[in-house]
Amino acid sequence: MLYCRSRRNKLIQTSIQMKKIYIPGARSQIARHNTIRDINRQIVLNFIRVHSPISRAEIARETSLQRSTISAIVEDLTQEGFVEDIGTGTSTGGRKPTLLRLKTGTPVALGVDVTPRETTIALADLAGNLLETERFPTSSDIRYMNEQILGKVSKFAASYPNAELRVGISIPGIADPSSNTIAYIPYFQWTNWDIGKQIEEKTGLPVTIDNDANAVALAELWFGDGQISKTHNFITILVAEGIGTGIIIKGEVYRGEFGAAGEFGHMYVGEGAPVECSCGRRDCWEAHASEKAMISRYLNGRESVAKGNVDMEQIINLALNGESRAIETLKSSAKSLGIGISSLIVGFSPQAVVISGSIVRAWDIVKEDLQILADRSIRTELASPAIVPSTLGDEPTILGSIGLILAKKFAAGS
Ligand SMILES: [Zn+2]
């Protein structure tokens, strides 16, 4: 999100390959890269991830793999610390089956979530549980940020020398995965930041960097509500300082040429927005429906008096406590959000649209206006896609940074 279109061509010259994100069942894609044994291992691991607690017999029924193959794979996965027994389930006649689940409590991923206000470094296990977190205010001084992130990641790496950690970095900007650099973060005007390369050189840990909205889309596939994680075509809309969209097509994040797809925050939705967009215009979706638009709408011309005295969290709390001005702000902002969503639905025909960000806390207040506006563009002969709140919580981009790693870990089975 927060992408400034005018600088694209100047800054991004490297062609960025779209990376494949594997999902359970996507066997044909996996087969190009792995042996049969690796494929079977991924199938078993992903079944345990999605369906745990699950027994070996159930995995055999669902995957059509031989029971002996599954037992051998489960033994390997247990020894390698991916999977654990959690006791016995209900018998269907014979011996009670042992149930399996992903092993929790062992650190495998180190997420670095850079947002305009705060940077979080979080250590997580295979199930996405956060084991340790460190936070600090994001500074506009890139040298300070570089030092902080490098220092904290190195400290985590040194504290867990035996853990097979990987580092995922979520940023409000454009990443270049081919060189592991951050191409551009418009909020701070940072360009060509090679923090990924520096982390790899200093710690030896592999690093993956991606745009925050892409990372959140991936987290929805990995940790989201069961209905969403089983959906193969959906769009996530991250409503924060700006508006970012992540596009999942056939279970993969669609990044487009230059990794710059999904910048719908800058599509034209009408003149007269309450704030300037990060690109400087006043007709972008982001200028009408981002958190900064909502704050401005709430203040309604009183910016000079109240600037800095109210934030999104307070507006949501006020609305939940029944304050009419706050409720009206959220409802009219939901209409602005709905206008953009209707265009995305017409263009992509997704199975679902998932909204994430703090506005989700006020879902009961905004859902009706969102749906009404979105429905206006839906062709009557087709079923409406579900517009649903994210279940990733108030800080979806943290789980996004972790999701970048777990997606790789499960796909590679290593
Ligand atoms: Zn814009």
Image (cartoon, helix red, strand yellow):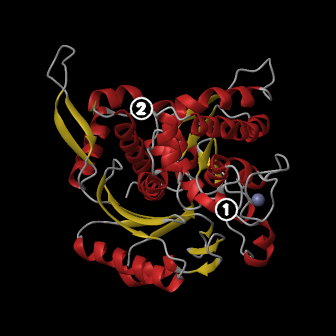
**In the rendering, which numbered label is found on residue 63?**
2
- Element under disc 1: loop
- Callout 1: CB less than 8 Å from ligand 1: no
Disc number at residue 2?
1
**Residue 61 drawn above or below residue 230:** above
Residue 285 versus residue 152 in the image, above or below: above
Q: Where does residue 214 sit, x and y in percent of width and height?
A: 59, 54
Task: Give the image location of residue 347, x and y in percent.
Answer: 79, 39
Identify which residue, 329 or 27, lies in the foreground. Answer: 329
Outermost residue, right direction?
271
What residue lies at 76% left-to-right and 55% top-to-bottom? 266
State left or right for residue 195 relative to residue 338: left
- Of badges 2 and 1, nearer the viewer stands 1
Q: Earlier in the sequence, mark 2 or mark 1?
A: 1
Q: Quadrant of ligand 1?
A: bottom right
- Please, what is the three-letter code of the amino acid marked with disc 1? Leu
Q: Amino acid at mark 2?
A: Thr
Percent x, y of residue 391: 46, 38
Q: Which type of secondary structure does the marked residue at label 2 adopt?
A: helix
The local crowd at label 1, few if under 14, some if 14 to 19, many if 20 or more residues have their Cα within 10 Å, is many
- 231 or 300: nearer the viewer: 300
Q: Is residue 348 above or below residue 160?
A: above
Mark 2 surroundings within 10 Å by alpha-carbon count, few (fewer than 14), some (14 through 19), many (20 or more): some
187 or 345, which lies in front? 187
Mark 2 CB in 8 Å range of ligand 1?
no
- Which quarter of the picture shows residue 59? top left
Percent across and percent down for residue 169 are 48, 66
The dot on residue 175 is: none
In which image quadrant can residue 260 be found? bottom right
Label 2, label 1: how many angstroms apart (C-alpha)?
43 Å
Q: How many marks?
A: 2
Viewport quadrant of the N terminus: bottom right
